[in-house]
Amino acid sequence: MSITERVADRMGLIEESATFAVADQVKKLRAEGREVWDLGGGDPDFATPDHVNGAAIESMEQGNTHYVASRGLPELRTAISKKFEEDNGLDYDPLEQIIVTPSAKHALFIALLTTVNPGDEVLLPSPSWVSYEAIIRFVGGVPAFVPLESEQGFVLTAERLRSALTPRTRMILVNSPNNPTGRALTREEVTAVAEVAEEADLLIISDEIYEKILYDDREAISLGTMPGCLERTLTINGFSKAYAMTGWRLGYVAGPQEIIAEVLKAQQHTVGCAGSFVQAGGLAALTGSQDCVAEMVAEYATRRNFIAEALDELPGVRCPKPDGAFYVFPQVEASMFGDDTAFTNWLLESAGVAVTPGCAFGPGGAGHVRMSFANSQTILEGALEAMRRVWPSS
Ligand SMILES: Cc1ncc(COP(=O)(O)O)c(C=O)c1O
């Protein structure tokens, strides 16, 4: 047997993460001495708030460096339950309906592992975050992309969802605010998801990790609050984005007790539990002052306006302002550069600006690129200046 034949067949279904691939390319160019403006990643440039760091350090110093309950620290689950009630209008019992996970990504992974049978189709409105497709495939499911139209503002409708239904459809996975488009689902769209889920008897996975990063007084609507949806929804969230805690790896999943009991088995036999002192940091994040979140969001809002307006002024680029998250997803005229991958390569080569090609986010992303403004204003201005220098005049 050759060494490559030792790799399981399922790995052939999965591609390397496009965002990590961009990061690797950036590292390579920098090692060669090139100046690179990296707008590829989705990692806040802010430091984790001091009181969060302090709580974790204190916990560690107190000796909390061992395994803890697989579901998560009881006091953290209580805080998460309170957050759900106050912020989202969701009623989840901390004892039996919430599991704290090492990252929202792991929450998604064990949620899908628990609920998707081989061959089950998962409706995936696209553009959507790069890892959903991979996770669905990992667990033996089939992503059923529902491409949304850029010209119509990536609006999700019941008709579009219905047109992708088959007898094998088992679930719908939604993410609002969305990575990469930055769109937050409106009440009409959330109602459409709920309606179709009910009609076709689907489970809903609602990834709400960007819920705190919203602009222009937009409201975050949790799918679980829609009539009849609490019983069919798994809500995913985490600390990475709102509290600038990407390196901590801390998230959570909440849902019906019967499903969560099964998800717990997947947690127990994969990671056991989320980090003990990491959870103390998470508790401080949720129970401490939320001013740090408001300050970061205010800064993101300023950057959003700057980058969206500057991009929109470039010939051949259309860049609406996102409702939330920290990405812009401009459409770039194909006639100027070819497809989005060709454009991404051209941009990196000629301007030293790293972005993620839209096709990485499924069929709905073609013709776009994702640029992250979880980067300082100086970096954004540098990137825009570099683009203007090489941009064709028409
Ligand atoms: C939509 C979405 N969900 C989940 C995650 C994963 O977050 P975490 O850092 O908690 O794994 C990300 C990270 O980029 C994301 O964009």
Image (cartoon, rainbow, N blue to C red):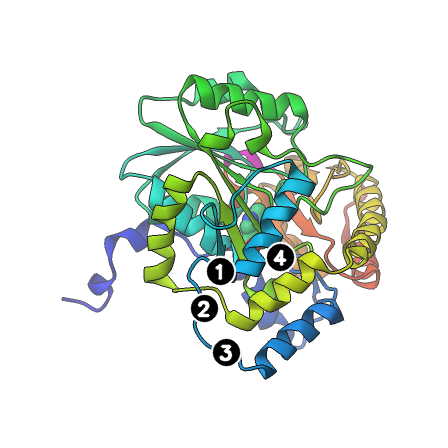
| Residue 181 in sight | no
Identity, as a three-letter code, of the amino acid under mark 4: Phe
Q: CA distance from mark 4 to mark 2?
A: 19 Å
Range of residues picked out in magenta: 363-367
Report crowding for label 1: few under 14, some 14 to 19, many 20 or more residues within 10 A (C-alpha): many
Identity, as a three-letter code, of the amino acid under mark 2: Val
As helix, strand or loop, the secondary structure at mark 3 comes to loop
- Report which residue position mark 4 lands on: 239
Q: Picture quarter containing residue 384?
A: bottom right
Q: Residue at coordinates 69% horizontally, 36% vertically from top-left?
A: 220
Q: CA distance from mark 3 to mark 1?
A: 14 Å
Which disc is residue 326 wearing? none
- Report which residue position mark 2 lands on: 68
As helix, strand or loop, the secondary structure at mark 4 comes to loop
Report crowding for label 2: few under 14, some 14 to 19, many 20 or more residues within 10 A (C-alpha): some
Q: Nearer the viewer, mark 4 or mark 2?
A: 2
Q: Position of residue 235 (x, y in %)?
A: 52, 41
Left/right placement of residue 185 relative to residue 49 reads left
- Report which residue position mark 1 lands on: 72
- The answer to which of 382 and 144 lies nearer the viewer is 144
